[in-house]
Image: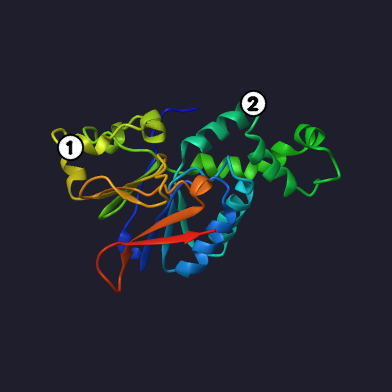
Amino acid sequence: MENRVKVERIDENNYDRIFAISDLHGQYDLFLKLLEKINLKREDLLLILGDICDRGKKSYEIYMKCMKMIKLGYNLKFILGNHEDMLLENFENDYPLNYETEYSIYKNSKYFEKKNIEKWHKENFYAEVKWLIKWLKDCPLIVYGNENIFVHAGLDLSKDLENQERENVLWTREEFWMDKKNILEEYKNKNIYFGHTPNMNGKISKKSNKIYDIDCGAFFTHSLGCMEVKNKKSKGIREIYVHC
């Protein structure tokens, strides 16, 4: 797996509303509930900050839903998470996948119940996930906007975007918001949203004045949190929750 950190820069003025969620981990029904609650429009932007797959039973359904939405003209950006990073490594090296993730792909295959999972994996698996591999490889690790930065796990605030380390932005659990002495100017006036470290109370947590952990531990807590970070009709940010 290459080590570069892909950064995508966006103009937030192009969207009426901007929403961010993270760490769905196969919780497809929660995802659908959220889409219904926010009533996402084609003029809006939805960012998913990584880790759609593993743990839950419906990872592939979420990936397929995301791709369908993109094809229908919705603005959806997916940021690579550490579980997608592992998924790509497993794809490339034919390592075993997380069982729930592989079974989610298998049960959505046209060969489901026509072939057992072992025969299907050997004969059809890679052809069926080719689109997913391509999409994930094209996804950024950081999205940088006019007022907001989105990343899966965290940032080294002493380094500019181009010098961030891939392992850090995907895997860190360091309290990076505590480093107030070495923070670069480009981060000082930005809101930063990240996931990866679950809030086991099922709530979004504010880590500093402008830094938020939006991973609500959906698989464990059955709660999905969403930050509305922009709404052209109102000022400020808003927390939105769905439960099952």
Q: Residue furthest bottom?
A: 233
Q: Secondary structure at mark 1?
A: loop
Mark closest to the chain's N terminus, 1 or 2: 2
Q: What kind of residue is marked 1?
A: Ile
Q: Is 108 placed above or below 46 here?
A: above
Q: Position of residue 220 (x, y in %)?
A: 51, 45
User: Residue shown at 48%/54% (left/top)?
Assistant: 223
Q: Position of residue 175 (x, y in %)?
A: 28, 35
Which of the 4 image quarters holds residue 161?
top left
Q: Position of residue 176 (x, y in %)?
A: 26, 35
- The residue that disc 1 covers is 183
Judging depth in this view, the residue of 182 and 209 nearest the camera is: 209
Q: Is residue 66 visible?
A: yes
User: Residue shown at 63%/49% (left/top)?
Assistant: 58
Q: Is 64 placed above or below 127 here?
A: below
User: Residue shown at 76%/38% (left/top)?
Assistant: 124
Q: What kind of residue is marked 2?
A: Tyr
The reply, left or right, for residue 125 in relation to residue 221 is right
The reply, left or right, for residue 95 in relation to residue 125 is left
